[in-house]
């Protein structure tokens, strides 16, 4: 009988631990979305300024792409990243390909699977 009671207590503790973990992860995800909103406000100003002023400074553009890349888990930040990549492509196509692949490696591994299969066939 005591073994059954211990098992129930253990299951209850595990369930409580899992519930706490899920709540913690939810709070982290919510704070990440908040940070993404703040980053979107700041970086969209920079992206618009680069495009409107026709700025061709690779250092400025690449630094901005580096910063935005970290937030590309967020759809609106991804739109901003793509917008800047499209602009930068006509300035430096090779560097832009690097940034596209960086996004794919970090956030979209599924898109790389067909490429990996081709390499294995060769």
Image (cartoon, rainbow, N blue to C red):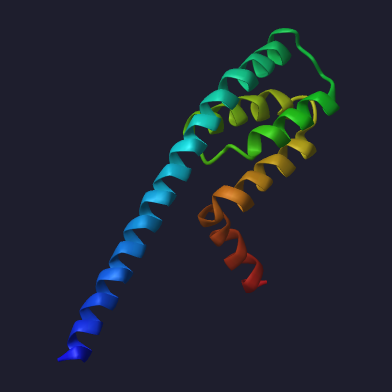
Instruction: Tell me where residue 24 appears, x and y as whole percent.
Output: 42, 50
What quarter of the picture does the C terminus occupy?
bottom right
What's the residue at 52%, 41% (across, down)?
73
The quarter of the displayed image where residue 99 is located? top right
Instruction: Tell me where residue 112 appears, x and y as whole percent.
Output: 58, 56
Q: Nearer the viewer, residue 121 or 109?
A: 109
Q: Is residue 58 above or below residue 16?
A: above
Q: Is residue 8 above or below residue 37?
A: below
Q: Nearer the viewer, residue 41 or 89?
A: 41
The quarter of the displayed image where residue 27 is located? top left
The quarter of the displayed image where residue 68 is located? top right
Furthest residue toward left: 1
What quarter of the picture does the N terminus occupy?
bottom left
The number of numbered badges drawn on the structure is 0
Instruction: Tell me where residue 81 appears, x and y as whole percent.
Output: 61, 30
Q: Is residue 56 above or below residue 67?
A: above
What's the residue at 78%, 38% (across, down)?
95
What's the residue at 73%, 26% (across, down)?
88
Instruction: Tell me where residue 47 appears, x and y as whole percent.
Output: 67, 19
What's the residue at 64%, 38% (across, down)?
69
């Amino acid at each position: 009988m005591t073994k059954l009671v211990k098992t129930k207590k253990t299951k209850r503790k595990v369930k409580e631990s899992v519930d706490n973990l899920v709540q913690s992860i939810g709070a982290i995800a919510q704070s990440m979305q908040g940070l993404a909103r703040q980053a979107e406000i700041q970086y969209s100003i920079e992206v618009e300024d680069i495009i409107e002023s026709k700025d061709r400074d690779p250092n400025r553009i690449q630094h901005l792409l580096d910063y935005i890349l970290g937030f590309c888990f967020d759809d609106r930040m991804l739109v901003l990243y793509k917008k800047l990549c499209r602009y930068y492509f006509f300035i430096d196509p090779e560097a832009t390909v690097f940034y596209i692949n960086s996004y794919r490696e970090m956030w979209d591994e599924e898109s790389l699977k067909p490429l990996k299969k081709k390499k294995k066939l060769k």
